[in-house]
Image: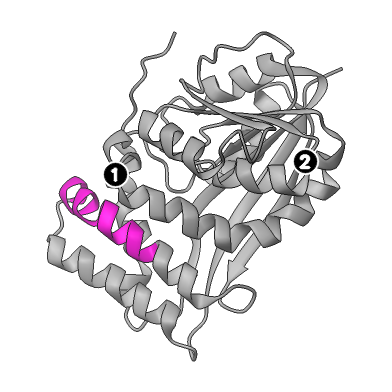
Amino acid sequence: MPESGYGQQEQMEDPSMEGTLRAQAEMIWPLEQPVLERLGFGSFETLADLGCGTGQFAGRAAGAWPALRIHGLDLFDRHVELARELWPASEVPGVSFEQGDARATPWEDGSFDAVSIRHVLHALPDADAVLAEAQRLLKPGGLVYVLDEDYAGLLFDAPGEPARRLFHDARPALAKHGTDLFRGRETFRDLRAAGFTDVRVDPIVVDTVNTEREPFARMMTFWRDGYAEFIAEAAGLDPRDVFARFDALIETLLDAERYSCWLLFAVSGRRPA
């Protein structure tokens, strides 16, 4: 069994992450739901949501497809507790949450029609273990769905090159902690290497035209509060500089005359029948 910890666990479990997950879901879900419809989520009976966080995805999926039985799993017990509070079994009977490691789940082989893994793999040095676990959990022909991040796809018309280069400058330092900020582009290849078939990519572009600026800026504010000091320490930068770069991005997101976007990769594949 893999070790339960990972490189940026402290930041992922910072209280700011609760706000991050909520803001991300507000932004992404309206664009993501049509992709999931095309992939057949409405026909599935069971879904394992690995790295479910506070249940923002699972709760919305349960609302969209009430017949779907969703089992969420997250390493951080506080997130599991909050998920249960936000989506109580008395109100959302098709959803359950438990604490556990996505790399070694407690469920039996071939238990699920689909497995979702969202905003997780870039933070793990052993992402292949999560994909292997998804393969084990799926029924033959079952679907794995990965929403992965690539921070080179965060583009801002920010006033100044330092702000625009924030995540490029942070990448080498965070790699030492097992986090790959440019991982999203590799997910297609990783799913094929893990043995999945019919692998496809549905790009999702969240921008300041198709979503409200406020949740986008709110997400970036939570990122700043949870990650600025970590990035500064890891990269040997002045924390004041990193905070200033984040602030410039937040100001850009709120400026109606400036454009920003976030490219995400919805990558899916099938366990061989």
Quadrant of res 39: top right
Q: Identify the residue at image location x=30%, y=68%.
A: 246
Q: Amino acid at mark 2?
A: Pro
**Residue 223, position as x, y percentages in the image:** 34, 57
Can I make out residue 232 in this image?
Answer: yes
- The disc, 1 or 2, on the residue closer to the chain's N-terminal end is 1
Q: Gap between marks 1 and 2, in whole Å? A: 31 Å
Name the side, left or right, on which 21 lies relative to 162: right
Quadrant of res 45: top right
Helix, strand or loop at disc 2?
A: loop
Where's the N terminus, which quadrant? top left
Q: Amino acid at mark 1?
A: Asp
Residue at the outermost front position: 90
Q: Identify the residue at image location x=57%, y=45%.
A: 148
Q: Is residue 171 above or below residue 126?
A: below
Residue at the outermost bottom position: 257
**Residue 69, position as x, y percentages in the image:** 72, 30
Here the colouring is one colour
Viewer-nearest residue: 236 or 52: 52
Where's the C terminus, which quadrant? top right
Q: According to the image, label 1 marks what residue? A: 14
Q: According to the image, label 2 marks what residue? A: 66
Can I make out residue 151 in this image?
Answer: no
Magenta region: which residues?
A: 220-235
Residue 229 among those drawn in magenta = yes
Which SS does the magenta portion mostly show?
A: helix
Helix, strand or loop at disc 1?
A: loop
Quadrant of res 237: bottom left
Is label 1 in contact with label 2 (beta carbons under 8 Å)? no
**Residue 162, position as x, y percentages in the image:** 29, 72
Foreground disc of the pair 1, 2: 2
Q: Identify the residue at image location x=78%, y=22%.
A: 271
